[in-house]
């Protein structure tokens, strides 16, 4: 069957003092999730487990993100998280630290619904 993207949400998160890329990524995902209210599932009687979820995180140090921790924060669907180089590090030379900024894109897919449901 053919899948269609039904949701695209974006978010931004940061860790200003801990310099933790996973924490910034988790906050970016939560920011994106809090922009959504999906009534499609209850209206059409679709189980959330039918939804495939792709999450792309952008940070300056992708290897420092724990994808399992980010995946655990996703409340619904069959999720896959990948991390790419992106986001932003704001360096504080005087303090010898960096502020980590992550971006997240969450895409949700369902199998083609035409013919399965009729809205009234």
Image (cartoon, helix red, strand yellow):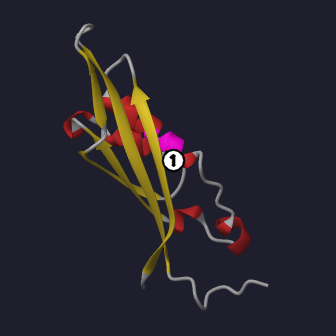
Residue at figure coordinates x 30%, y 35% from the top left:
88
Residue at x 60%, y 91% (from the top left corner):
115
Q: Which residue is mark 1?
A: 32
Q: Quadrant of the C terminus?
A: bottom right
On the rendered structure, is 66 left or right of 104? left
**Quarter-of-image position of residue 93:** top left
Nearest the eye: 14 or 44: 14
**Farthest top residue in view:** 95
37 on left or right of 75: right
Q: Circle 1: is it few (<14), some (14-19), or many (20+) Cα within 10 Å? A: many
Q: Check the picture and name the quadrant holding the N terminus.
A: bottom left
Q: At which x and y percent is residue 110?
A: 50, 73
Magenta stretch prevailing secondary structure: helix
All told, the count of numbered labels is 1
Q: Nearer the viewer, residue 63 or 49?
A: 63
Q: Secondary structure at mark 1?
A: helix
- Vertical comparison of 18 with 23: above or below: above
Which residue shows up at 71% across the image and 66% down it?
42
Query: Which residues are drawn in magenta?
Result: 28-32
**Most distant residue in the right direction:** 120
Magenta stretch holds residue 3: no
- Outermost residue on the bottom side: it is 115
Residue 116 percent location from the top left of the image: 62, 87
- Name the quadrant containing residue 71: top left
Above or below: residue 70 compared with residue 118:
above
Residue 55 placement (x, y as % from top left): 39, 53
119 relative to 106, above or below: below
Q: Position of residue 73 (x, y in %)?
A: 48, 41
Residue located 20% across and 37% down the image: 63
Task: From the viewer's side, name the closer residue of 18 and 72.
Answer: 18
């Amino acid at each position: 069957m053919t899948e269609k993207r039904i949701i695209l949400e974006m978010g931004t998160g940061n860790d200003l003092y801990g310099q933790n890329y996973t924490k910034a990524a988790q906050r970016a995902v939560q920011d994106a999730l809090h922009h959504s209210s999906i009534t499609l599932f209850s209206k059409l009687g679709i189980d959330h487990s039918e939804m495939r979820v792709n999450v792309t995180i952008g940070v300056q140090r992708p290897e420092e993100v724990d994808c399992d921790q980010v995946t655990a924060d996703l409340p619904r669907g069959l999720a896959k998280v990948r991390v790419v180089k992106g986001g932003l590090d704001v360096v504080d030379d005087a303090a010898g630290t960096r502020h980590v900024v992550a971006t997240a894109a969450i895409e949700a897919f369902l199998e083609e619904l035409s013919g399965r449901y009729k809205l009234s």
